[in-house]
Image: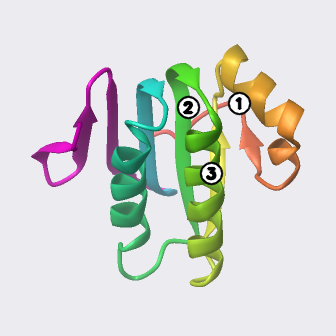
């Protein structure tokens, strides 16, 4: 299924939605639903939009609290966003990972390469 765009900051695929919004600390990307091979491109699109904000943000936060499924495609998307962000001196923070996501991050060691926050910056 190809992604359908509901607005300039949202991306939807099946049972997955990714959005981004501005906060005083920088862009916040919110991911909800099932992040898998079919929906990873939606998250990638929204992450690229968040990283394209100018001037380049110091931090982009990815709120993972709404994820109900998370596989290697989602993991690869986050790692690629981290690489893209490093090219512009931006740090990608992962926030509020659900138990499912936290377990995948821990098993793979990805929790060691990202800052993981318990909360999302307040608006």
Which of labels 3 and 1 is toward the front? 3
How many angstroms separate mark 2 from mark 3 (CA)?
Answer: 15 Å
Query: Within 10 angstroms of label 1, few (less than 14), some, or many (20 or more) residues?
Result: few
Q: Quadrant of the C terminus?
A: top left
Left or right of 37? Residue 45 is left
Outermost residue, left side: 6
| Residue annotated with mark 1 | 118
Q: Is residue 109 visible?
A: yes
Provide the major secondary structure of the magenta segment: strand
Residue toward you, 40 or 61: 40
Q: Quadrant of residue 50?
A: bottom left
Q: Earlier in the sequence, mark 2 or mark 3?
A: 2
Left or right of 10? Residue 93 is right
Residue 96 image point, x, y percent: 64, 28
Residue 59 position (above or below residue 28): below
Which residue sits at x=44%, y=69%?
Answer: 51
Which residue sits at x=51%, y=22%?
Answer: 67
Which residue sits at x=76%, y=29%?
Answer: 104
| Residue annotated with mark 2 | 64
Q: Earlier in the sequence, mark 3 or mark 1?
A: 3
Residue 76: numbered disc? 3
Which residue sits at x=35%, y=39%?
Answer: 18
Q: What scheme was used to colour the molecule?
A: rainbow
Stretch of the chain drawn in magenta = 1-24
How many angstroms separate mark 1 from mark 2 (CA)?
Answer: 10 Å
Q: Secondary structure at mark 2?
A: strand
Residue 60 image point, x, y percent: 53, 58
Which of labels 1 and 2 is toward the front? 2
Residue 96 position (above or below residue 112): above
């Amino acid at each position: 299924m190809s992604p359908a765009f509901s607005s300039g900051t949202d991306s939807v695929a099946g049972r997955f939605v990714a959005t981004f919004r501005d906060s005083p600390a920088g862009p916040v990307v919110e991911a909800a639903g099932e992040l898998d091979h079919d929906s990873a491109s939606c998250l990638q699109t929204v992450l690229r939009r968040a990283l394209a904000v100018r001037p380049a943000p110091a931090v982009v936060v990815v709120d993972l609290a709404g994820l109900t499924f998370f596989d290697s495609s989602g993991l690869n998307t986050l790692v690629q966003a981290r690489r893209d962000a490093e090219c512009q001196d931006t740090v990608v923070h992962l926030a509020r990972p659900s138990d499912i996501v936290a377990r995948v991050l821990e098993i793979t060691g990805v929790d060691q390469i990202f800052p993981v926050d318990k909360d999302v910056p307040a608006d």
